[in-house]
Image: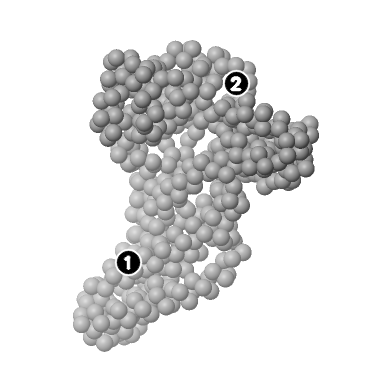
Amino acid sequence: MNKKELISSIHNVIENRSKKEIVKILHNTYPVDLKEAFEEMKPQEVFNFISLMPLKNSSELFGYLDEQMQLTILDFMDRTMIKELFEKMPSDERADLFNIMSETLQDRILPILTKAEQEDIIKLSSYEENVIGSIMTSNYATLKANMNALESISYLRKIAGDIESIYETFVINENRELVGSVSLKSLIMAEPDSLIEDFMRKNPISLKASDPVEFCVKVIQDYDLLIAPVVDENNILVGIITYDDVIDVAIEEAEEDFQKMSGTSVEVSKHGNTGVLTSIKDAAISTLYKKRIYWLVILVFGNIFSSAGIAYFEDTISAYIALVFFLPLLIGSGGNAGSQSATLTVRALATGDINLKDWAGMLGKELMIATLLGLTMAFAVSFVGIFRGGYEIALVVSLSMIFIVMFGSIVGMSLPFLLSKFKLDPASASSPLITSITDAVGVLIFFSIATSILDIPA
């Protein structure tokens, strides 16, 4: 059914309080489709529908809702409903929700939870926001090396409904240190009386809870993992990361890098409403304003240097007014080349494809590529130069194109390396910043070459 029909069915369920109809909707509709339908409904209506659902389904669907909708619906719930909901929610989603609550709401909810749930929320919430510990889940199963395959399968069958995944189970010793891993496939294929220690994978790839979240994307991608164990500094197993968590991280990092490259990023607050802009349609005007005004104001003053350069070469411009025609073309090409280089470099640094020690090699390669690009673009624009001002103008424009494209490319490639060197986010080498630098220097390059070739007094 389409969204309009789904919303109509939900309204009918709410009105008739038909649990049979709810089951039918749940069986025939994906949670993400329900979430999209909820976005066009009032929070009270969403709560009324969720409150009629079986607890297992309601806790799963609740996790699909955006954070603001979750907080609003919590206001409609009584203590019993909140307690039951938090019991069924995955531990990482529960901690994320707790982190965005106001202190008043946190104080209201924490006392009604079990001691184990309180400790779990506090532990997961204690990790800094951009480390792996902040996105891991504590809903996982463990096995002991002296268990056999038959009792391991029986144990996993009993707890499968309460844990994140059983595709890979991790083996710990009496001190909870990670010693191995066992896939569900290997458990099924093993002889019933085979001991785990005889067929487990020893020393599995693991992540540290204190590692940055970007690191888990690279590890899970490089080793083609569905699940990765998370350990502390003493190799004690503290959680797991699943591939769907990694996809969320990768998407968020890409969005954040894109926004920084476009000069529209803001600091992410664990309890506030600022952060990566995920929906321009729903974002408040004030949020969009704050995201964009910072770089624009800085770049206004940066562009003063371009204006100063033009003013300095006023005599050159007066003598050859045709030069003005080519100025936007030349500095625009330099800015575009720089933005291309920066985008490629930022992405390569983020994925670990290159690091700081690769700068010299990348510089040589970028110089060759930029020279080829500059020569190609110079050849193309030379015909326009001949048409607009003759062969001398064509020579000025062609040489300027080569040097401006080379400069823009080198700046775009090098600036992310420089920021990484000083422990800053290379994505902050935003396209507007590179464009402004290239504009200012491009003006100087263009009019300096023109003054020299056309023999105009500076």
Looking at the image, tell me whether mark 2 or mark 1 is earlier in sequence order. Answer: 2
- Residue topped by disc 1: 332
Q: Is residue 446 left or right of residue 385?
A: right
Q: Position of residue 56 (x, y in %)?
A: 48, 23
- According to the picture, the residue beneath numbered tag 2 turns out to be 118
Q: Amino acid at mark 1?
A: Gly
Q: Residue 431: x and y, percent?
A: 39, 57
Helix, strand or loop for disc 2: helix
User: Which amino acid type corresponds to the residue marked 2 in the rendered image?
Assistant: Gln
The answer to whether residue 48 is above or below residue 213 is above
The answer to whether residue 418 is seen in the rendering is: no
User: Residue at (66%, 39%) from the top-left corner?
Assistant: 188
- Based on the displayed image, in which of its 4 quarters is residue 11 positioned? top left
Residue 441 picture location, percent across and down = 39, 68
Q: Residue at x 35, y 46 (%)?
A: 292
Q: Quadrant of residue 175?
A: top right
Nearer to me, 263 or 143: 143
